[in-house]
Image (spheres, rainbow, N blue to C red):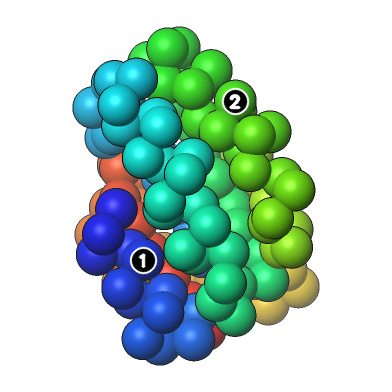
Amino acid sequence: MESVAQVIEQNGVRQTLVDMNGLPSLSLDDQFWVASTWLPRVAKGAVQRVALVLPTRNMYNQLVVEGLVRTGRHFMSYDIQFFSSTHEAADWLIGDHPPVLAALLSEWPYAQDSAVSTTR
């Protein structure tokens, strides 16, 4: 998560797709750190849209992520949407540009697995 924050800060990322499927279960300490440190940090950047792919096999993390987003909504000025697949999330970010979406998915080795990808 530190790496994601650094990429957002250093590259002026406006749109990002975050696939939460590979994330280990978040402890209470992790949840507190995300809510109090990480979310405010990334909210200061240029981010305008976030596509979150929620974990399909880890209901605990799905509930944690939804709770963290609700908790952080007061300082998140960007649009955030939840998805069940990376393809749906990428489609929402790219919109009416099917060739761009197809190219990104063909380059992204984790298109069907868990990963974090950012686009500008």
| Residue named by callout 2 | 67
* Left or right position of 77 against 35: right
Report the amino acid beneath label 1: Ala
Crowd tier of the residue under label 1, counting other residues whose Cα lies within 10 Å: few below 14, some 14–19, many 20 or above = some
Q: Amino acid at mark 2?
A: Gly
Label 2 packing within 10 angstroms: few (<14), some (14-19), many (20+): few
Q: Quadrant of residue 15?
A: bottom right
Q: Secondary structure at mark 1?
A: helix
Q: Residue at x 31, y 32 (%)?
A: 30
Mark 2, secondary structure of its residue:
helix
Query: Which dot marks residue 5?
Result: 1
Cα separation, mark 2 vs mark 1, equals: 20 Å
Does label 2 or label 1 sit earlier along the sequence?
1
Residue 31, given in percent of the width and then of the height, sits at 40, 30
Left or right: where does residue 77 sit relative to residue 59? Answer: right
In percent of width and height, residue 100 lies at 55, 79
Residue 91 in view, yes or no: no
